Image (cartoon, rainbow, N blue to C red):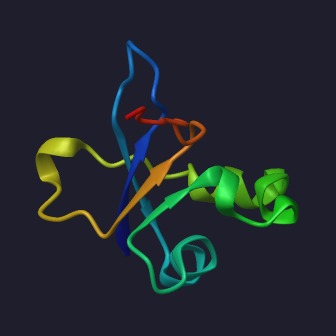
């Protein structure tokens, strides 16, 4: 079981931690430990059955010893710095 922290980017965000199987973890993260939903293949983004499985087991934060991955469900911020 891998623990994944979900960050949705909202101002009133509630940081959730979900327990997922090794197989589910590999499908989302591959060899990474942090991903943005927008960077995943569109077919995976739209696979409702997969995401139902992904979100099936929320873990009580006080019981978690470590986080294996971070999933950002909001789009990456587009920031430019002018000189």
Image point (50%, 61%), residue name: 35
x then y, percent, for residue 20 = 47, 67
Q: Single out the residue that lies furthest toward the front.
A: 83
The tally of labels here is 0
Against 73, residue 32 (above or below) is below
x then y, percent, for residue 79 = 48, 35
Q: Is residue 13 left or right of residue 40?
A: left
Image point (59%, 74%), residue name: 24
Q: Is residue 49 left or right of residue 35?
A: right
Q: Nearer the viewer, residue 79 or 62?
A: 79
Against 29, residue 8 (above or below) is above
Image point (36%, 25%), residue name: 14
Rendered image quadrant of residue 74: top right
Q: Is residue 60 left or right of residue 77?
A: left
Quadrant location of the C terminus in the rendered image: top left
Quadrant location of the N terminus in the rendered image: bottom left
Q: Nearer the viewer, residue 63 or 13?
A: 13
x then y, percent, for residue 49 = 80, 56
Image point (84%, 59%), residue name: 42
Q: Single out the residue that lies furthest toward the top.
A: 12
Against 72, residue 42 (above or below) is below
């Amino acid at each position: 079981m891998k623990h994944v922290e979900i960050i949705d980017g909202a101002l009133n965000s509630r940081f959730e931690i979900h327990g997922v199987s090794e197989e589910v973890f590999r499908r989302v993260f591959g060899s990474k430990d942090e991903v943005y939903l927008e960077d995943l293949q569109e077919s995976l983004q739209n696979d409702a059955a997969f995401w139902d499985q992904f979100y099936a087991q929320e873990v009580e934060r006080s019981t978690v010893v470590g986080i294996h991955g971070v999933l950002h469900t909001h789009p990456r911020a587009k920031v430019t710095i002018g000189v």
